[in-house]
Image (cartoon, helix red, strand yellow):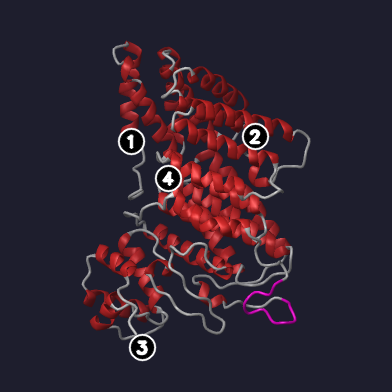
Amino acid sequence: MSKGPNTRLADLFGMTGWSKGELARLVNRQAAATGHPQLATDTSRVRRWIEMGEIPREPVPKVLAALLTERLGRVVTTEDLGFERAAGPGRVRRQSDDALPWAPERTAEVLTEFTGMDLMLNRRGLVGAGTALAAGSALTSSLHEWLHSDPAAPGAPAPGTPAGGGTASAEPARFGRYEATPVGAQEVEALERSVEVFRAWDAERGGGLQRKAVVGQLNEVGGMLAYRHPEPLQSRLWGVAANLAVLAGWMSHDVGLEPTAQRYFVIAAHAAREGGDRPRAAEALSRAARQMIHLGRPDDALELIGLAKSGTGAGAHLRTRSMLYTIEAWAQAAKGRTGAVQRTLGEAEDLFAADGEGAAAPTWMQLFDEADLHGMQALAYRTLAEHDASAARRARTHGELALARRPEGRQRSQILDYVSLAATGFLAGDPDRGEGYARLALERIGENSSHRTWDRLRETYRLTAPYADDAAVKALREEMRDTLASAPKARTGPI
């Protein structure tokens, strides 16, 4: 019986410019190249997929996803194709991509497929339009109950695990590009160390240089998660997946791949929760909130940060809660709410101070140190200063404290400090100070791959306009225009 038109597939097909006959021929050719020469798709079958909601058998969904990924220059997974299939023995029900959250046993599969397609785009140098970002409310409404409930008990068997326990395959072949293998404690320790290396690289030079390496490592971990490992090894492996997914998302955001970044943040939240680490899931959602503020969507950010704060659970570290408050303050600043910004940053300071000699912060929070606390306060007050000029003084104070406390190896944050302080100078009516910090930023901005630094520099250039008649600022504006002309091109589509 017909399900009716598959609008998701129809929309994707419409963007390709192909005819139905062309798509049928491409599917047959791609299937033959991947070991399925018997496939004989024709125009009428493609029409039934699109117009009648017919669900093709494997390997057609994977073939379609690969063809659309290459054609559109963005990641298209089988989740995006609008196919739903009832669960059968040893299988899980396929969901549309909008059906968040997905079933727990789907997380590793979604992770592995998405990273596999992302790697394919990297290898072929394809960059295209992308899809629109989901609104904050769409994510929070679908994830609220899921984040507040408990995942499956650690001892519960995974699909494919024999009743007697032990390590067994959970259909690793369906996960895609790499053969899944079980791992031991030494391998997980090595993966955990690799996360720290990737995190340090990102902080120093921005996300563009190592993004592919992080995505590749995450793809491998997704394959490993096809197996049920003994606890707590399984939880640690989910933790590695969450950390790598956050990094992949942050690096994608850093180079303007916004829909891709958002998907990685959601994958990270799922992985963290599967590992029983709600605070980690909340931090992943806070990254999505920061992305929304950067893109001028503070209301969406407030939705996401509200979910992150409520979903951390009782075990959230004080420093984690402090960080969440700084992001909320930044979103409130973008809306010009002076009182809310001051109250929220006060909460952040109190929580950070109360951390004192308490439990050690988790590794993924160790970059949120005193310098970063001041840096976020400077950013919030600098943003507020466009609505309330009196905030510029506080922005300058916190910006200078952040800059003084930045440790070695945080080049991107240092550049952002310079840009914030430059903007603050122009907002405070102190163009000499603004010019000095802007020149420090110009000296270093070409040494990193972060698009965010360039975006902030563009905002600062706008703030120099009232001082365009000043000789020094006039020369600075010319230099800024020349520098911005060589900025990396944005690689995102509709947002």
- Give the vertical position of 434 relative to 109 (above or below): above
Of mark 2 and mark 1, the one earlier in the sequence is 2
Q: Estimate the x, y position of residue 418 in percent, counting from the top left.
A: 49, 25
Quote the CA–CA distance across marks 1 and 3.
50 Å
Regarding residue 366, the answer to whether it shows in the image is no
Residue depicted at 45% across the width and 44% down the height? 300
**What is the crowding at mark 1: few (fewer than 14 residues within 10 Å), some, or many (at least 20)?**
few
Q: Nearer the viewer, mark 2 or mark 1?
A: 2
Q: Which mark identifies residue 486?
A: 1
| Three-letter code for the amino acid on which mark 3 is drawn | Gln
Q: Which residue is rendered at x = 55% and y = 85% of the image?
A: 89
Q: Earlier in the sequence, mark 1 or mark 3?
A: 3
Quarter of the rendering containing residue 130: bottom left
Q: Position of residue 73 (x, y in %)?
A: 34, 59
Residue topped by disc 3:
38
| C-alpha separation, residue under disc 3 versus residue under disc 4 | 41 Å
- Dot 3 or dot 2: first in sequence order is 3
How many residues crowd mark 4 within 10 Å: few (<14), some (14–19), many (20+)?
many
Tell me where the magenta segment starts and ends, as one range: 156-166
